[in-house]
Image: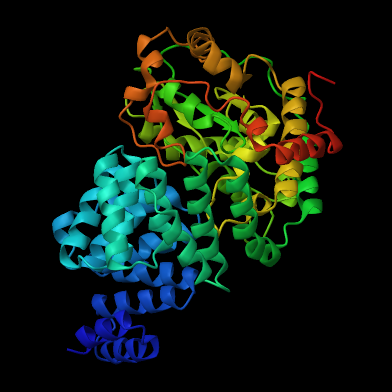
Amino acid sequence: MSIVEAKKQLRAGALKKAYDLALDALALDRADAEAWGVMSLVALEGGNVAKALDISDKAIALGNQSPLVLGGRGRALLATGRQDEARELAASIPLDACGDALEADTVGVILARTGLHEQAVPYFERALSTQPSNAQFGYNLATSLQFVGRLDEARLAYARVLDADPAFHRARLALVQLQSRGEHDLAAVETLFEQCSGDADSALQLGHAAARILESRGDHTGALDWLFKAKHGKAAAVEHNRAWAEKLFAAARERNPASLQPVAETSEDECAPVFVLGMPRSGTTLVERILSSHAKIATAGELPDFALLVKRSSDTTGPHTLSPELLSAAYDPEQVGKAYLARTEPMAGANLRLIDKMPFNLFFAAHILESLPAARIVMVRRDPRDTVFANFRQLFATDFGYYDYAYDLADTAHFVAGFTDLAEHWRAALPAGRYTEVHYETLVAEQESESRRLIDFLGLQWDDACLHFHRNAAPVATASSVQVRAPIHNKSVGQWQRYGKYGEQVDADLRRFGVSFADN
């Protein structure tokens, strides 16, 4: 009975009471697997992730296979960067084993965060069927529905979230992005924005929603005015450090790739990783969709694994998996390569190429080719001015500090200039047989020839399915999840010119930061 009460106290957030009750149970029986399970969850909720993993090991070894404990262990694995283990653990938990809504939602979140959105949907549906008014459960379901392309269902799910909780502004922003122009209610968004004074995250979400509405009506400068207003509080809070960004780019450039083989031959029947890199919102998802439409190419989405493995192999410490110190650190390329392949080859299945589309692996281009002799890199580039506006207009994850540049237009231009310089460096320094560029503007103008060139670069025979990437049914867990389900178009080329004085400002900032254009 004490363990039943301990779980009740745990879910109520009474960690001390839950701990004491579990400790009482262990005093009677040190092999009580349920009590150890509660202890592991107390450690997790208390922020001691390492302890939670140790204790969950003991609970599971003693026979505790409850989704509550397994789900908690999965969360701890995610927190320590062990994505592959978390993915495997969550995939092993049957839906019918989830005894309540929280267990089902927890498993669904782990599946979704490790790229398995299709598998996550039934777990979110189970959670929501038990607690239909839980806005977070509804949002989780709506997001996975959107990423797997079930857009009509996603719209309904986001709308139900707002019915349950009108202040769930992340759902409002997502719904605005999925709705047609005539459905937008700008006045309602403006009213809500006025009511969220002091809440920087709510201001961000609502301001981005208002900007999207104005963009859809053709008022591009008005949309930017909204973004300036919405991002001001967050920009002041995070205080993006340009000097740190410059050190990051410099550390990447200083990586000596001289030992790289000019060409590592890859036969058509050999499994090899493909890294699609570039600034966010530059066309990386479009390239991924074109390539993964090929019968022999699969995609793993955006994996954090490579940088985590480099860090684990180095002697660097601290919470960040992207830092100047890590980029400069000594590490074991062979060890990293073997570990990366062990994690990712099962995702490829019968396919011969597997795409990893984590954009900021662009800093690790030399590490990738050092560690994985069969790897190929496709660097996606776009007009830096369009890239600046595309990043500034995007609301990235607010708890992921690498995107802090996007709260200020000039900071965004500074960061994009750093990327442009780094991309030029990689183009000159890395072996052409293993590294290639694709320019977004050329791709949308010459889709077939550029797509054929990329497939040839990967050492495969042409597949006509690459021309029909919008029919690709694989999940898309990025901001481009809607756009890439339509045929290719050039509507996003030259967008920076729509923003009048702001476009001129960005053009001038980029030139000041060292970017040159053909019209110089």
Relative placement, left or right, of 215 versus 224 is left
Q: Position of residue 452 (x, y in %)?
A: 49, 9
Q: Nearer the viewer, residue 198 or 368?
A: 198
* Count of numbered circles in the view: 0
- Residue at image position (46%, 73%) is 51
Left or right of residue 365: residue 304: left
Q: Position of residue 342 (x, y in %)?
A: 44, 38
Q: Is residue 247 above or below residue 170?
A: above
Q: Residue at x 44, y 21 (%)?
A: 290
Quadrant hosting residue 307: top right
Decide: is 432 above or below 170: above
Query: Is residue 440 visible in this depiction of the protein?
Result: yes
Query: Horizontal placement of 331 versus 74: left or right?
Result: right
Query: How is colour applied across the structure in the image?
Result: rainbow
Residue 77 visible? The answer is: no
Q: Quadrant of residue 235?
A: bottom right
Quadrant housing the N terminus? bottom left
- Name the residue nearer the viewer: 136 or 223: 223
The residue positioned 66% from the left and 33% from the top of the image is 496
**Which residue is at the far left?**
96
Residue 7 in picture, x, y percent from top left: 26, 81
Q: Quadrant of the C terminus?
A: top right
Taking the spot 27% from the left edge, 64% from the top edge, the residue there is 163
| Residue 431 % position (x, y) | 69, 18
